[in-house]
Amino acid sequence: MSLPESGNVLSLKGQIDLHVSPQVAASLGAIIDQEPSRVVVDLSGVSYIDSSGLAALINGAKSVETYGGRFMLAGVQDDVRSILERAGLSQFFLVFPHVDAALAAT
């Protein structure tokens, strides 16, 4: 089963660092402004994320929680998963194996 990607999915690629994180935050903000019931960030194409990228995700998650939505990460690769674990964030985020699983979650 493949669910269509919608306006509440942000697909990221490459390395999310100090140079890219402002764009990530702006893109997330544009999605969050619409107050969808769920926001899914697809990290399947991300090989690295630094503290500024993590901050953008944390701020996005908090904003979504403020209006009662759900913020989800999908497709987290092993390298990024280990960064989340070292930062103590693996339990902070709802993590799904792929976008379809996040969109289908209840």
Image (tube, rainbow, N blue to C red):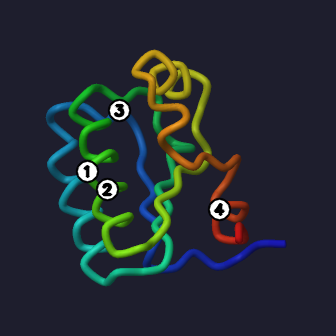
The residue shown at (42%, 62%) is 10
Q: Residue at x 45, y 72 (%)?
A: 69
Q: Which residue is mark 2?
A: 62
Q: CA distance from mark 1 to mark 2?
A: 5 Å
83 relative to 25 in the view: left or right: right
Relative depth, front residue between 52 and 11: 52
Task: Tell me the CA gap for discs 3 and 1.
Answer: 19 Å
What's the mark number on residue 59?
1
User: Does 76 sit left or right of 66 as displayed?
Assistant: right
Nearest the viewer among 90 and 3 is 90
Q: Residue at x 21, y 43 (%)?
A: 21
Question: Disc 3 on helix, strand or loop?
Answer: strand
Q: Secondary structure at mark 4?
A: helix
Q: Secondary structure at mark 1?
A: helix
Quarter of the figure with the N terminus: bottom right
Q: Which residue is mark 3?
A: 15
Q: Are marks 1 and 2 in contact (CB under 8 Å)?
A: yes
Residue positioned 64% across, 79% down in the render: 4
Query: In the rendered image, which quarter contains the C terminus?
Result: bottom right
Q: Position of residue 28 (x, y in %)?
A: 29, 62
Q: Tell me whether circle 4 and circle 3 mark residues in contact (CB < 8 Å).
A: no
> Label for residue 102?
4
Type of amino acid under label 1: Asn
* Type of amino acid at the residue the image marks with label 4: Ala
Q: CA distance from mark 1 to mark 4?
A: 19 Å
